[in-house]
Amino acid sequence: MGTWGFDRQIEPKSCETGRIARVPCWKEILASLHKAVYGWSDDFYGTQAQIDSSTLGVMTSGATTSNISGLSIARNLALGPSADFVGIEKEGVAAALAHYRFQKAVIICSSFAHYSFHKTAGILGLGERGVIVAWI
């Protein structure tokens, strides 16, 4: 795989778009960024970059897209599949809340959170009133 780091020349414009996580050069870019932060071994990054089901991060075009992606993942993990339930993605919000015996699901964020948290809560079926802001 070669040496990981920012000195490696990677041409992202030559990559195909679409399923970015599966495009090898984007996986290498994410691995380089991950290594800059966490500093794990070259063997780890060389192995992870070759596994289709593995990703070391996600690149998005901005804050709104990042919040939608991150909060969607959090919602799906919190209300995900169990032994007798296939998860919120397949069953929907009402069924997930009923299955887990919750009255509602909320997002708690600080007063410094990006304005898109309210929009994202609506998109994810939690409702804009499902955002609880901690004023700090």
Image: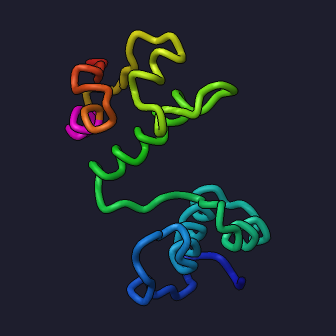
Magenta region? 113-120
Which of 134/12 is in front? 12
Instruction: Give the image quarter of residue 2.
Output: bottom right
User: Is residue 136 visible in the rendered structure shown here?
Assistant: no
For residue 76: magenta? no
> Where's residue 49, x and y in %?
66, 71
Quarter of the image with the N terminus is: bottom right
Residue located at (30% from left, 19% from top): 132
The image position of residue 30, as x and y in percent, is 54, 67
Residue 129 seen = yes
Quadrant of residue 3 within the rendered picture: bottom right
Locate the C terminus and report the quarter of the image it occupies.
top left
Residue 111 located left or right of residue 74: left
- Answer left or right for 70 relative to 57: left
Q: Is residue 89 above or below residue 110?
A: below
Q: Is residue 117 on the magenta stretch?
A: yes
Main SS type for the magenta part? helix
The percent coordinates of residue 119 (x first, y second) are: 22, 37
Q: Residue at x 29, y 32 (%)?
A: 121
Along the line of sight, the residue nearer the viewer: 113 or 101? 101
Image point (67%, 61%), residue name: 39
- Where residue 101 sits in the image (x, y, percent)? 51, 10
Q: From the viewer's side, name the closer residue of 104 and 45.
A: 104
